Image: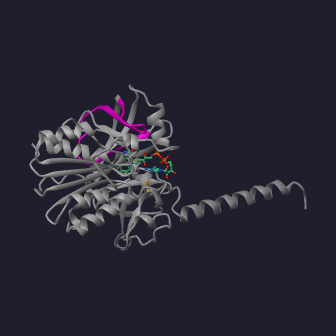
Amino acid sequence: MNPIFTPIILIGVLIVVTLIVILIDKLLGGGGESTITVNKDNVISVSGRDTALNALTANKIFLPSSCGGKATCGTCKFRLVDWHEAPKPTELPFLNKTEIEEGVRLSCQVTVTGDMSIEVPPSVLNVKPFYGKVVEVEQLTHDIRRVKFEMNEDFPFKPGQYLQIEVPGIETSRAYSIASDPKDLRHPEVIIRLVPGGVATSFVHKAMMVGDKLKITGPFGDFFLQETSNRPIIMIAGGSGKAPIRSIIYKLIDQEMPRKATYFFGARTKKDLYYTKEFKDIEKMYPNFRYIPALSTPLPEDDWDLDIGLITEVVARHTDDLSGHEAYLCGSPGMIDACIKVLKDKGMPEEHIYFDKF
Ligand SMILES: Cc1cc2nc3c(=O)[nH]c(=O)nc-3n(C[C@H](O)[C@H](O)[C@H](O)COP(=O)(O)OP(=O)(O)OC[C@H]3O[C@@H](n4cnc5c(N)ncnc54)[C@H](O)[C@@H]3O)c2cc1C
Ligand code: FES
């Protein structure tokens, strides 16, 4: 063959291969325009093949995403309407049978490959980005810090809800329950426990300074005080789970503590306790309120003469029939599951038990 034809043949082959690649990409929906119809009436345009979570964020619809899309938090759920694609194995730990049947998915695990229709909780459409300047940092225990922000505008939240903080430089966000008085919408506070090696908590505990400006989104969450109820309340928390309960208690104080409220807080040793005086002082002021801190493994030097035991044992000891009560729980998944069992054994209906696990 005449050598002059070799480059021409090569260029021809390259063009054909490129066209095939473009065709395959188009067939898979890549690079093209798709639409996502949100809650039946809001239609947004999406180009390329991004995850639904990212596509929604780019269009200012902020689903919660407290692991930054790694499929480890399960907070970014939405419902795919008329779209039959089985959830990925990464999603299964976060979806129950009913959710799978109804088309609920983790939006960070769904790729937009064509037009789709979705349902999100209406409250999510009120979520927007804010900026918060760090105005106070307080070390509460050896591994827990309180951080107070001054927001660029009022941050409207219900007591119990959470916000997301974006870690500067890596644009990944983490969820933190709001720990402060819901009356002060300009200055939300969070309580953050250091997770060794954790991206966000290492930043907060080791690098963040007063004066830093952070990107914050919210408010998120369906764990909040049921303000129209008049049932007596049981609250149970461990570790940084004290955060949303503190906000709920501030709200009850604003209402002059109209309902009986008993708050159990579990820690391992005395060095893991915080705000004991704050809650004991509230107890002195409001006869309807009781604060019961308990240590599971007190040290001899703790000199602890109050409740000892797992928080489930302590709750079981201090309560009788709970069929007319409601409960707010916040702590590790294991603690919450064990507490729900105790409360149900004492007659509390499951639908009156509200919780956030983290
Ligand atoms: C709704 C909600 C509310 C939350 N509220 C609070 C709050 O008020 N205060 C608070 O401190 N945290 C809260 N969290 C947890 C928080 O969002 C982060 O997950 C946590 O701070 C760890 O973030 P990180 O970036 O430091 O760790 P990552 O970098 O995400 O994780 C580092 C490693 O630690 C592991 N890890 C992550 N979290 C924990 C944990 N809690 N215990 C043990 N190992 C862990 C991970 O699996 C990973 O291997 C909340 C979470 C949710 C979903
Ligand atoms: S963002 Fe955490 S599971 Fe999707």
Seen in the image, is 142 located left or right of residue 293? right
Residue 13 coordinates in the image, percent (x, y): 74, 60
Marks counted in the figure total: 0
Q: Which residue is at the front of the view, 97 or 114?
A: 97
Q: Nearer the viewer, residue 65 or 180?
A: 180
Q: Is residue 174 magenta?
A: no
Residue 295, given in percent of the width and then of the height, sits at 34, 49
Kindly identify the residue that appears in the image at 43 percent across and 44 percent down.
173
Q: Residue at 30% across / 61% down in the picture? A: 339
Image x and y of residue 83, in percent: 40, 70
Q: Is residue 69 above or below residue 145?
A: below
Of the 4 image quadrants, the one containing the N terminus is: bottom right
Q: Is residue 163 visible?
A: yes
Quarter of the figure with residue 43: bottom left
Q: Nearer the viewer, residue 346 or 252?
A: 346
What is the x, y in percent for residue 93?
44, 65
Residue projecting furthest to the top? 211
Depth check: 101 or 357 in front? Answer: 357
Q: Residue at x 34, y 41 (%)?
A: 303
Q: Which residues are magenta?
A: 137-166
Magenta stretch: includes residue 153: yes
